[in-house]
Image (cartoon, rainbow, N blue to C red):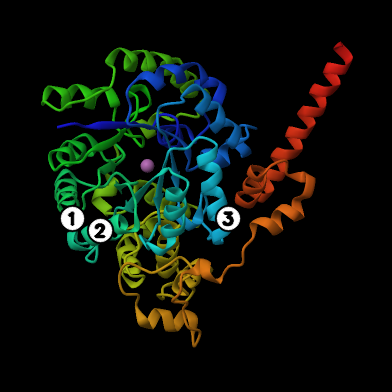
Amino acid sequence: MKVQFTETVLRDANQSLIATRLPFEKFEPILEKMEKAGFYSVECWGGATFDSCLRYLDEDPWERLRKIKSKMPTTKLQMLLRGQNLLGYKHYPDDVVKKFVQHSVSNGIDIIRIFDALNDLRNIKVAVDETNRCGAHASGAISYTTSPVHTLENYAKLAKEMENMGVGSICIKDMAGVMSPKEAYDLVKAIKETVKIPVVVHTHSTTGLAFMTYLKAIEAGADVIDTAISCFSGGTSQPATETLVYALRQLGYEIDVNDKLLLEINDFFKPIRAEFLESGTLEPTVLATDTNALNYQIPGGMLSNLISQLKAQNALDRLEEVLVETPKVRKDLGYPPLVTPMSQMVGVQAATNVLIGERYKNISKEVKAYLRGEYGQAPGEIDAELTKKALGDEQPVTCRFADTLEDAFEATKKELGDKAQSDEDVLSYIAFPQVYEKFREKREASLENRAQYTIETM
Ligand code: CO
């Protein structure tokens, strides 16, 4: 049986370990070798890379993508997209989603992994359809979580609906690294029995389960796993590529990656890792195993947020109470997966309930928006009393939230005028308006400097 690898060093490993601070020129020299290494795909764009390019690295994310493509013309380049939220947390109208997908593909993306935090498939449909229309591969990702409503049957049903929608593969996306080997085995098996398309598994090493989880997922028939080259692996990143290649090959799996090139790729990234460790951007603690997420059944990032929130209010002694309240709030909200922004929403509400001493006396505006249906449909049933308390007589929207939004691309383009040089600029602005403005000013200043310099030296 064949197992394939998606290398994440340029996106998820970069994002999870060093806050997506890897500039293009640092990894440019290794791209030609990565191109030949035999990966199923290289995840290199989307997620936080876009924001980070504009905000911290003074790079045009679109130009980064084109440059990667020019060095890796045949390897499949992959990006992560939050469905109707694109790369952020708010819903965009359909015309913007379509344009974003079109330009992602025309600038070099081959595979778009599309997910919705609530697994509300209405929120991924437009992106999936457009990806297919553009001739790229849409991978439908399931946000993994555990709850009484997240049963194997429901997950398999979700995968089937995605297959019917036209995705080319199903990805089980365990962003918190909490999926256990047994859960992975059962889930992959259930999905493989239901759909015909390949199954990809994505997890993080955070809790230490990942190697075992991948092994059991593969035993159950997973086709592709996400891994990171060893010196950018482990901790909050993915498990190591080379380790899994070694172990799986010995077990008789057919694997096409080139070991010699993996060695060279890792040697290339070692000094880069040393540099980030030295500067403090890479903190050694994120490389360690943290099992708290298993004890408390909430993701590690959410726990550290709760702790700092309570510290700020001088109430760290109430942590245990908040940890008891958290699953109750999650239940009241219909068991949303604890991913951003739901993890913050649930955490803050639980802390508020405890600190005020009365449940839902204060309801955050995010929770109200959630109850209004602005994020999509909850996986389970929302507590009716809570909805009534938060919304009064106001009725939650039952349609897809993006249906309430007006087209925005052409109007924004017009409004920007010569502040945008391309449709890609317009999309950067729509995604991150202030960040784009600052980026554009800097870009113009540096272009002017360059022009000045050319004139003077000619
Ligand atoms: Co991830």
The amino acid sitting under disc 3 is Val
Question: Which of the numbered marks, if any, corresponds to residue 160?
Answer: 2
Name the outermost residue toward the bottom.
393
Q: Quadrant of residue 408?
A: bottom right
> Is 443 situated left or right of 105 in this image?
right
Residue underneath mark 3: 96
Across the whole image, how many numbered discs are drawn on residues? 3
CB atoms at circles 3 and 2 under 8 Å apart?
no
Q: Is residue 436 above or below residue 122?
A: above
Question: Residue visible at 39% across and 69% down?
Answer: 377
Residue 364 visible in the picture: no
Which sits earlier in the primary sequence, circle 1 or circle 3? Answer: 3
Quadrant (top left/top right/bottom left/bottom right) for the N terminus:
top left
Quadrant (top left/top right/bottom left/bottom right) for the C terminus:
top right
In terms of secondary structure, where does tag 3 sit? helix
> Is 30 situated left or right of 234 in this image?
right
Q: CA distance from mark 3 to mark 2?
A: 27 Å
Q: CA distance from mark 2 to mark 1?
A: 6 Å
Q: Horizontal and vertical percent for residue 454?
A: 83, 17
Under 8 Å from ligand 1: the CB of mark 1? no
Mark 2 nearby-residue class (10 Å; few <14, some 14–19, many ≥20): many
Q: Horizontal and vertical percent for residue 80?
A: 43, 44
CB atoms at circles 2 and 1 under 8 Å apart?
yes
Residue underneath mark 1: 194
Mark 3 nearby-residue class (10 Å; few <14, some 14–19, many ≥20): many
Q: CA distance from mark 1 to mark 3?
A: 33 Å
